[in-house]
Amino acid sequence: MQFPNVQGSNLMREKIHLPQDFEGKINIVLIAFQQWHQKLVDSWIPAVERLETDFSGLVYYELPTIQSMNFLAKAFINEGMRAGIPNLKPRRRTITLYLDKEPFRQALEIASEDSITVLLVDKDGEVLWSCDGSYEIDKELALKEVIEATYQVQQSD
């Protein structure tokens, strides 16, 4: 499965094209569809920060994914999120996508917007692993296993 070509802006007001602008050799992507999903995303942050520390070249991103809307509505939402995140690092890695959500979800085989989706995506946009829902230790261990296997393959190339 390939991560679809999409465009968004991070909370530093920089335009981002994905998957080409993912900075990591491999990337953890936390996709949220509803405002209340932030608590689910936050449940993953300690684990993905640990993984980012443990694996050089691993970067994680938060992708609030919102239906397309007009410029003023986008500005209101983006500036509200920006005000709530004073730290520059999370602002840089939070990329808001305003798009037609159905084709995006279909491309990533996301069945519904009832929860968040967590993906592991390589530098070429290939999705290596996915799950949905809040953090659980078993999910972290499964993710870590795929990361370790990916790093072993990359080192042997």
Image (cartoon, rainbow, N blue to C red):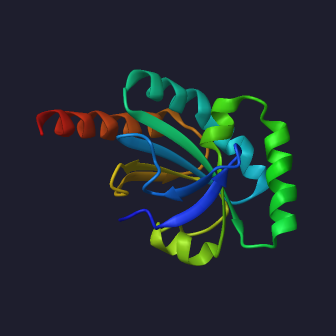
Residue most toward the left?
156
In this rendering, the answer to whether 129 lies above or below 103 is above
Give the x, y percent position of residue 109: 47, 69
On the image, the x and y values in percent for residue 4 come to 46, 67
What x and y, as percent, mark residue 85?
A: 78, 35
Q: Does residue 37 appear in the picture of this structure?
A: yes
Q: Position of residue 102 (x, y in %)?
A: 60, 77
Q: Residue at x 79, y 42 (%)?
A: 82
**Marker count (numbered):** 0
Quadrant (top left/top right/bottom left/bottom right) for the C terminus: top left
- Residue 86 occupies which quadrant of the picture? top right
Q: Quadrant of residue 144?
A: top left
* Residue 38 placement: quadrant: top right
Residue 116 visible (yes or no): no
Query: 11 or 153: nearer the eye?
Result: 11
Quarter of the N terminus within the rendering: bottom left
